[in-house]
Image (tube, rainbow, N blue to C red):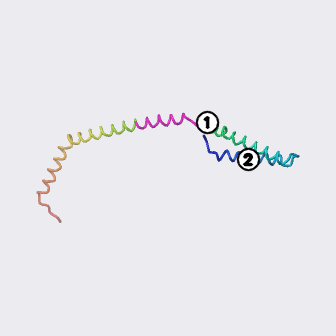
């Protein structure tokens, strides 16, 4: 249910006060005014359960939770697909790097070693 018994007590207090002050200056006996106000408070206290149930029913939206679950499933599927594609791209790039660039890297290393062998003149 929406809320707590606290709302029921507030409703009962408000109902008691309204009934009491609306009948206070009428020619009723004080006992009748107090009993009538107490009955109004008890009825309002019980009616607040129904009011809270209706409010909770109105605010409960199962469509949103189902959509969120569907969205989470789609996100998890897309995350898995993204991770798999990243892994396959990484695997392909390392294979390409090993196959294509190994000759180029070897050539660069030979060139650098050849330059080290030559005497360098610093001015």
Front residue of 106 and 79: 79
- The residue singled out by tag 2 in the image is 14
Q: Is residue 68 magenta?
A: yes
Q: Quadrant of the C terminus?
A: bottom left
Upstream in sequence: badge 2 or badge 1 = 2
Badge 1 marks a residue whose secondary structure is helix
Residue 117, image quadrant: bottom left
Residue 122 location (% of width, % of height): 17, 64
Q: Is residue 20 above or below residue 118?
A: above
Front residue of 116 and 41: 41
Q: Is 27 left or right of 51, judged from the image as shown? A: right
Closer to viewer: mark 2 or mark 1: 2
Badge 2 marks a residue whose secondary structure is helix
Q: Is 25 left or right of 88, judged from the image as shown? A: right
Q: Give the residues in magenta.
A: 58-76
Q: Quadrant of the N terminus?
A: top right
- Farthest residue in the front direction? 31
- The residue singled out by tag 1 in the image is 57
Residue 4 location (% of width, % of height): 62, 45
Q: Is residue 63 magenta?
A: yes
Residue at 52 percent across and 36 percent down: it is 65
């Amino acid at each position: 249910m929406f809320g707590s018994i606290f709302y029921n007590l507030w409703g009962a207090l408000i109902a008691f006060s309204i009934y009491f002050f609306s009948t206070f200056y009428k020619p009723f006996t004080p006992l009748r005014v107090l009993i009538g106000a107490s009955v109004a408070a008890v009825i309002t206290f019980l009616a607040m359960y129904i009011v809270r149930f209706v409010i909770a029913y109105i605010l409960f939206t199962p469509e949103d939770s189902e959509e969120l679950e569907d969205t989470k499933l789609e996100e998890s599927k897309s995350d898995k697909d993204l991770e798999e594609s990243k892994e396959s791209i990484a695997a392909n790039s390392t294979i390409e790097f090993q196959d294509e660039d190994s000759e180029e890297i070897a050539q660069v290393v030979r060139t650098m070693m050849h330059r080290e062998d030559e005497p360098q003149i610093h001015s």
